[in-house]
């Protein structure tokens, strides 16, 4: 039996979590993604909630599988996991939690200056991490669900769970099963999702580079095993000249509601470092530029185009990009803080005349 009064989430003591979990899981989404998993951070209340949600997946599979995936992604550990575990075990975390729960709101804020508070959160992440292997089996129950959306979320969740080194033994034969399902999927969206899951697990997505759908070909090209594949690079470049076309996959769980083109652009600019090859794609990103900061549409291209900051002897492609950036009136509103933050972070001038001069 969980004593929620001894736990807390992003907004305080977790007694309200017990009330939320007593109701329908389908109605718990706001609480799960605001209090329990807050902006990608987990809290002492997160591990028991993760276990409870996994036990109730049949009630609301899409919501539950999404939560499992997001928590698993948030707590991915590196090679220093045992060192972190030792630090958490040596810290007075239980006493800190009890004192935190008993404090008023102002005192709770003050307590975050103590390193022990950081280790409390690290302990919560470790507890979630240790849960991941035992969640593979309940998640795997949905891998071939009749509902395409449920299947997509199940594969995305199990892929995230398999980041734990002890998880793979819980669901043997996943890669050939996944490759078979991807090849048989009739829906472009499902095939693209399964192909990315296949590559994410280290499987060979290369055969899908000749898929009839450009979305599936691009999805295959984005997978880590094809990082250095020239044919994969060409597929990424082809899609990047019409980047909003890739947003047809926005509904896939792996993108978390964000435009898939942001992932495409990030992957492309990480793998292709010759800006002359990226030039046409960078121009295609301009209509969406500076809507956020740092700008996920144009920012990666600018980083490759101007790796050393503002150039003294610009290339033809640098001049061309500068000319096009300067020419777009909508990018130069006087109160566009997204532009200022993006350009400042890259060591580039937030001055239209400087861009005109370079162009």
Image (spheres, rainbow, N blue to C red):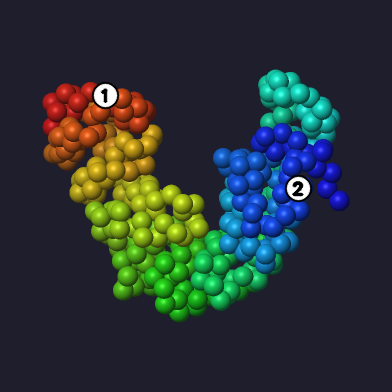
Q: Report x, y in % for residue 288.
A: 29, 43
In the depicted view, which residue is nearer to us: 187 or 90? Answer: 187
Instruction: Determine whether label 1 and label 2 are within 8 Å by CB.
Output: no
Which marked residue is nearer to the observer: mark 1 or mark 2? 2
Counting the numbered discs, the total is 2
48 left or right, relative to 248: right
Residue 275 visible to an observer of this rendering:
no
In the depicted view, which residue is nearer to us: 37 or 262? Answer: 37
Image quadrant holding the C terminus, namely top left
Q: Report x, y in % for residue 44.
A: 73, 40
Position above or below: 268 against 8:
below
Residue 334 is marked as 1
Residue placed under numbered mark 2 in the picture: 19
Residue 124, quarter of picture:
top right
Q: Report x, y in % for residue 94.
A: 83, 34
Label 2 crowd bin: few (<14), some (14–19), many (20+), radius 10 Å: few
In the depicted view, which residue is nearer to us: 313 or 191? Answer: 191
Q: Report x, y in % for residue 104.
A: 76, 23
Residue 87 visible to an observer of this rendering:
yes
Helix, strand or loop at mark 1: loop
330 left or right, relative to 51: left
Q: Residue at x 48, y 68 (%)?
A: 194
Whichever of callouts 1 and 2 sits on the residue coming sooner in the sequence is 2
Q: Residue at x 23, y 48 (%)?
A: 284
Label 1 crowd bin: few (<14), some (14–19), many (20+), radius 10 Å: few
Position above or below: 81 against 211:
above
In the depicted view, which residue is nearer to us: 115 or 41? Answer: 41
The residue lying furthest to the right in this view is 1
Position above or below: 328 against 177:
above
């Amino acid at each position: 039996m969980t004593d929620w009064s001894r736990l807390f989430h992003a907004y305080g003591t977790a007694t309200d979590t017990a009330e939320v979990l007593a109701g329908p899981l389908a109605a718990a989404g706001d609480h799960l993604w605001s209090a329990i998993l807050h902006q990608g951070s987990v809290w002492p209340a997160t591990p028991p909630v993760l276990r409870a949600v996994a036990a109730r997946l049949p009630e609301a599979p899409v919501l539950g599988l999404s939560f499992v995936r997001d928590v698993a992604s948030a707590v991915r550990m590196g090679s220093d996991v045992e060192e972190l575990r030792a630090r958490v075990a040596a810290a007075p975390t239980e006493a800190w939690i009890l004192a935190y729960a008993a404090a008023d709101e102002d005192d709770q804020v003050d307590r975050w200056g103590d390193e022990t508070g950081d280790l409390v959160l690290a302990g919560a992440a470790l507890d979630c991490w240790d849960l991941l292997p035992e969640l593979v089996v309940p998640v795997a129950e949905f891998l071939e669900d009749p509902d395409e959306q449920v299947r997509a979320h199940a594969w995305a969740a199990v892929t995230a769970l398999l980041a734990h080194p002890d998880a793979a033994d819980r669901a043997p034969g996943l890669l050939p099963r996944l490759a078979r399902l991807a090849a048989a999927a009739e829906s472009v969206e499902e095939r693209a999702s399964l192909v990315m899951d296949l590559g994410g697990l280290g499987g060979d997505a290369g055969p899908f580079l000749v898929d009839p759908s450009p979305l599936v070909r691009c999805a295959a090209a984005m997978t880590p095993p094809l990082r250095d594949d020239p044919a994969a690079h060409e597929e990424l470049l082809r899609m990047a000249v019409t980047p909003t076309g890739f947003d047809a996959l926005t509904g896939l769980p792996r993108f978390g509601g964000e435009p898939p083109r942001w992932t495409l652009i990030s992957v492309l600019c990480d793998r292709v470092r010759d800006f002359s090859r990226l030039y046409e794609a960078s121009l295609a990103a301009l209509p969406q530029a500076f809507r956020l900061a740092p700008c996920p549409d144009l920012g990666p291209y600018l980083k490759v185009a101007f790796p050393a900051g503002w150039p003294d002897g610009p290339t033809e492609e640098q001049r061309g990009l500068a000319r096009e950036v300067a020419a777009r009136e909508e990018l130069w509103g006087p109160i566009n803080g997204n532009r200022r933050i993006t350009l400042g972070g890259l060591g580039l001038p937030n001055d239209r005349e400087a861009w005109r001069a370079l162009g």
